[in-house]
Image (tube, rainbow, N blue to C red):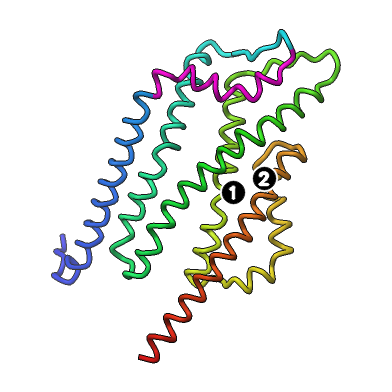
Amino acid sequence: MSEQTPDQEQHSLPLITHLLELRDRLLKVVVVVFLVFLPLVYFANDIYHYIAIPLTSQLPIGSSMIATGVATPFFTPIKLAIVLAIFIAIPVILYQLWAFIAPGLYKHERRLIAPLVVSSALLFYAGMAFAYYVVFPLAFAFFTTTAPEGVTIATDISSYLDFVLKLFFAFGLAFEIPVATLLLCWTGATTPTQLRAKRPYIVVAAFIFGMLLTPPDVISQTLLAVPMLILFELGLLFARFYVKEEVENTIHQESE
């Protein structure tokens, strides 16, 4: 068996160190998610009742949600508690990600990453709130009023949870567009001018994205695509100022 040379050992140690650090940070994330989950599981049924209000408030009198599986009434609220714990722990997840990559960044880059972590978490929560308070009431009112005559609406609680979690994730992800736009310009992958020139394609892409991530109705697709376009313009605005600042800093450094 061949032994490693000193140079090979020197190159392998940093990799092992990074892997160990990644493991430790993943364990911290798992512990935080578990600690958040513990109190949530006690209120799992109440949380599910709150999540189901946008649909139950639109159901005809005498109708209710149903559970078609034997263990569904137990496992569905538990599943919701687990996913909610992950959503609540997003700031910690993003912080651990930032702390892992921060040592490889320059000082001026680390100053930008911290606000991006905070804004990413806030935008994700804003997307979820927009879905719950704006999209759900409109979408479920549309669904319940378009049912054919003689059809009784009785949604399965597991199917409903999968549906709303998909929308929560879709809107939370869509609201990250300003951060994504800023990062694209920051890394040099594109510029605000180039993005503005491709605006017609981005409009089409937003509606395609809305079609893929939302139910097959025009209301949900539009309610996802329009905020995405507004947030894209907001990201362009911030990216323009940041790129301008970077250019000024570069000119200043060259003059020195």
Question: Which residue is situated farthest in the top direction here?
Answer: 62
In the image, the segment drawn in magenta is 40-60
Sequence order check, earlier mark of 2 and 1: 1
Residue 49 lies left or right of residue 104; in this view the side is right
User: Circle 1 sits on which residue?
Assistant: 174
Q: Mark 2 touching mark 1, by CB under 8 A?
A: yes
**Residue 184: horizontal and vertical position, in percent?**
52, 66
Question: Which residue is situated farthest in the bottom direction here?
Answer: 255
46 within the magenta span: yes
**Numbered mark located on residue 238 in the image:** none
Q: Main SS type for the magenta part?
A: helix
Q: 208 above or below 65?
A: below
Q: 57 above or below 8?
A: above
Return the residue nearer the eye: 120 or 149.
120
Return the residue nearer the eye: 86 or 117.
117
What residue do we see at 45% from left, 37% from top?
Answer: 87
Graded by Cα atoms within 10 Å as few (under 14), some (14 to 19) or many (20 or more), the crowding at tag 1 reads many
**Numbered mark located on residue 224 in the image:** 2
Q: Secondary structure at mark 1?
A: helix
Q: Amino acid at mark 1?
A: Ala
Q: Amino acid at mark 2?
A: Leu
What residue do we see at 74% from left, 63% from top?
Answer: 200
Residue 250 lies left or right of residue 5; in this view the side is right
Q: 150 above or below 132?
A: above
What residue do we see at 71% from left, 50% from top?
Answer: 208
